[in-house]
């Protein structure tokens, strides 16, 4: 069993990584300071199937009541209406301040159940059990929880750290290929932006061959950044935004249904590489080698998009530094980034032109 510590003092927690780690939840719970739990409320995505029963069975050995709430999850599940229903379920079941929410599923369940824990009775504890590769290396670590608003994604939320995260890699075995690629895309981001050795390791592996060692390294990278910049205020955590500014815009412009998140990040990183060279941060040959590999990752073809829709989505990015200026995280070298708040719409447009041309040439 591998373990990574998210070092936040009294709010710190372990991320346990390994095949069979769900079956050991009853051993991990007391070590995480949860031995006094009066109830565990498993909030799960129905698509996780037998994993729900495995989690409940392990928690039943912890001498506490176990409740299970199963949801048919879509992105629309992160809504005030669903959250209100969950509050009602907790109240009806008499869950008190020593109750613990256990989120079983991908990023949507983690965000939703984590925010439920952050706000119910002014905050109770929670445990993350991510069942997608993307959630395991990204959203399950760092405590960012929340729901969507009609005017945008993740506009309502809180930073509420879990008490424990359990990553059981056996839950990834039945993931659709696109879900695996999506997680792989996010892992490639860690390599390009933060860790040359990880990048070199990943480019030698097919997405389906990712193992616990690579997952642990990504988790450790994110844990270190979260420990240094928990609330995303010092600027260190923004490194994790590499490839996301345009990636998020592509997700938005296609209605959040065409691309998986990690697929859009792969395309966003390709556009960021173009900007990195154009802005004078990165040598053209370095960017070209990275782009050649990213181009080989199997993501859906870039559809015809209204350029104004994409630029408008970029303009709404959370990293906006001034009107007409977006702060991009760009590449200086493999494993090294630079923040640039002087990228203008014309440069973004050129990067999109090059991305569209490159995608068209292989379609």
Image (tube, rainbow, N blue to C red):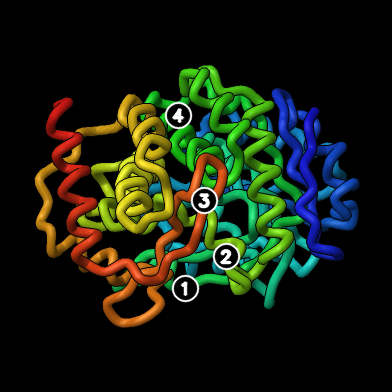
- For mark 1, does the 10 Å Cα neighbourhood hold few (<14), some (14 to 19), or many (20 or more) residues? some
Nearest to viewer (mark 3 / mark 1): 1
Q: Which mark is residue 109?
A: 3
Q: Residue 114's x, y, as percent?
A: 60, 60
Q: CA distance from mark 2 to mark 4?
A: 26 Å
Closer to the chain start, of discs 1 and 4, is 1
Vertical relation: 121 (above or below) 222: below
Q: Residue at x 66, y 30 (%)?
A: 168
Disc 1 secondary structure class: strand
Image position, residue 105 (x, y; %): 54, 42
Query: Badges 1 and 4: C-beta atoms under 8 Å apart?
Result: no
Identify the element where label 2 is drawn.
Answer: helix
In this view, 73 is above or below 344: above
Mark number, residue 275: none
Residue indicated by mark 1: 156
The first of marks 3 and 1 along the sequence is 3
């Amino acid at each position: 069993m591998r373990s990574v510590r998210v070092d936040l003092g009294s709010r710190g927690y372990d991320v346990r990584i390994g095949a069979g780690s769900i079956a050991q939840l009853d051993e991990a719970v007391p070590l995480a300071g949860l031995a006094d739990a009066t109830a565990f409320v498993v909030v799960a995505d129905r698509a996780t199937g037998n994993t729900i029963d495995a989690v409940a069975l392990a928690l039943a050995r912890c001498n506490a009541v176990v409740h299970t709430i199963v949801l048919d999850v879509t992105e629309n599940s992160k809504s005030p209406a669903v959250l209100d229903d969950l509050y009602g379920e907790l109240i009806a079941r008499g869950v008190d301040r020593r109750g613990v929410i256990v989120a079983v599923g991908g990023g949507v369940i983690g965000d939703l159940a984590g925010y439920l824990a952050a706000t119910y009775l002014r905050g109770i504890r929670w445990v993350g059990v991510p069942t997608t590769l993307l959630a395991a290396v990204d959203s399950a670590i760092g405590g960012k929880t929340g729901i969507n608003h009609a005017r945008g994604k993740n506009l309502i939320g809180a930073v509420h750290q879990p008490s424990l995260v359990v990553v059981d890699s056996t839950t990834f075995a039945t993931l659709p290929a696109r879900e695996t690629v999506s997680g792989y895309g996010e892992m490639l981001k860690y390599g390009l932006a933060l860790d040359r050795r990880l990048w070199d390791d990943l480019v030698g592996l097919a997405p389906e061959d990712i193992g616990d060692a690579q997952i642990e390294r990504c988790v450790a990278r994110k844990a270190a950044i979260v420990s240094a910049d928990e609330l995303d205020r010092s600027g260190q955590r923004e490194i994790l935004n590499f490839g996301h500014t345009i990636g998020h815009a592509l997700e938005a412009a296609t209605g959040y249904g065409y691309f998986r998140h990690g697929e859009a990040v792969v395309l966003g990183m390709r556009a960021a590489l173009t900007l990195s060279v154009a802005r004078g941060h990165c040598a053209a040959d370095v960017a070209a080698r990275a782009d050649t590999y990213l181009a080989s990752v199997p993501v859906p073809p870039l559809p015809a998009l209204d350029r104004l829709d994409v630029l408008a989505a970029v303009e709404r990015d959370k990293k906006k530094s001034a009107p007409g200026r977006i702060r991009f995280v760009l590449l200086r070298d493999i494993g090294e980034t630079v923040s640039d708040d002087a990228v203008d719409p014309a440069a973004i447009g050129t990067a999109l032109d090059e991305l569209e041309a490159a995608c068209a040439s292989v379609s």
